[in-house]
Image (tube, rainbow, N blue to C red):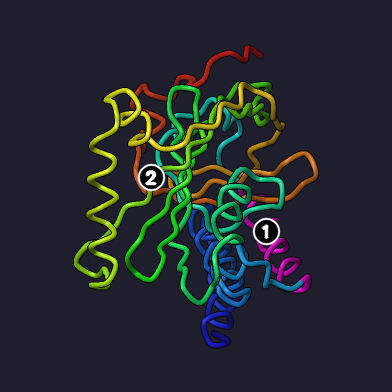
Amino acid sequence: MRELREGCLYFRRAVPLCPWRERAAEWCCLRVEFKDAGGFEALVSGKTTEMQRIDVNERIVGLERLNPTPRPTTSPFLEGRWNFEWFGDSSPGAFAARLLFERSPTSVAHFMGLDVLIKDGYSKLSSNLKFLNTIQSKFLLTTQLSVEGPIRMKEEYVEGLIAIPRINEESLPEQLKGLLGQTAGALQQLPSPIREAVSEGLKLPLGGAFQRLFMISYLDEEILIVRDAAGAPDVLTRLEGPQPSPGDGTADAVISEYES
């Protein structure tokens, strides 16, 4: 890890950098700090120290000053599926991750990740946890996004969904397979409307009761950085989605409520 950090710093100091190479060097240094802080699972479980958090935040600031997108809230780069690398305490990502992780013994539960799909003015956040390498649990959170300025947005929580756990029968202990069969049989005997409702999971209507303001401090084709009203950062990397070029005529607003 030390060698990797020194390599990133040497590259940044020794090589005359064009803007995209300077951003790549800063991102390299930030990823090293993520790993030093224990990675995503350490962040979710609250094991990161104050010193590790400030080290990460220092690198985030270094990348933010190189932001290549002056109006990120209406940029087509915003849409797509993003993976959380880091999040602040008031982030919807923190809420979804800890809802699953803090209620599960770390000896039997493995956090599989957190991602969000941004599309058509909504975000759909997905948090995944696996128990005993057999049972997968998922929490989904839907929020509505509205543009309040070139870098500022409002997010309203619309609905939460605790999905029915998925079970890998091949890795299920023999003593539990009979119980699984009995449970499946009992569900099939329920009236159709109830069975369909149960199969979809437990829905939690939120109706915009919770909301937050945030600003996008950095956005390019692969990286998104968001800060809440208290300044706490979320750092995300792209999993999938459109990556239009500025010259192909697709740089119109994705969410167009805001007019400057």
Q: Is residue 250 left or right of residue 32?
A: left
Distance from the alpha carbon under mark 2 to that under mark 1: 42 Å
Q: Which mark is residue 62?
A: 1
**Can residue 16 be seen?**
no
Q: Is residue 217 left or right of residue 188?
A: right
Three-letter code, disc 2? Ile
Q: Residues within 10 Å of mark 1 (few under 14, many from 20)?
A: some
Three-letter code, disc 1? Gly
Q: Nearer the viewer, residue 247 or 130?
A: 130
Q: Residue at x 41, y 37 (%)?
A: 201
Q: Residue at x 54, y 62 (%)?
A: 27
Quadrant the C terminus occupies: top right
Quadrant the N terminus occupies: bottom right
Q: Residues within 10 Å of mark 2 (few under 14, many from 20)?
A: some
Q: For the residue labelled by badge 2, is the local secondary structure a helix, a strand or a loop? A: loop
Q: Nearer the viewer, residue 58 or 180?
A: 180
2 or 1: mark nearer the eye: 2
Residue 45 picture location, percent across and down: 62, 67
Q: Nearer the viewer, residue 164 or 236?
A: 164
Residue 241 drawn above or below residue 177: above
> What residue would you read off at disc 2?
164
Residue 63 drawn above or below residue 208: below
Q: For the residue labelled by badge 1, is the local secondary structure a helix, a strand or a loop? A: helix
Answer yes or no: do the residues labelled 2 and 1 have beta carbons within 8 Å? no
Q: Is residue 59 magenta?
A: yes
Q: Residue at x 52, y 53 (%)?
A: 84
Main secondary structure found in the magenta portion:
helix
Quarter-of-image position of residue 77: top left
Q: Is residue 119 magenta?
A: no
**Can residue 80 be seen?**
yes
Quarter-of-image position of residue 163: top left
> Which stretch is magenta?
50-66
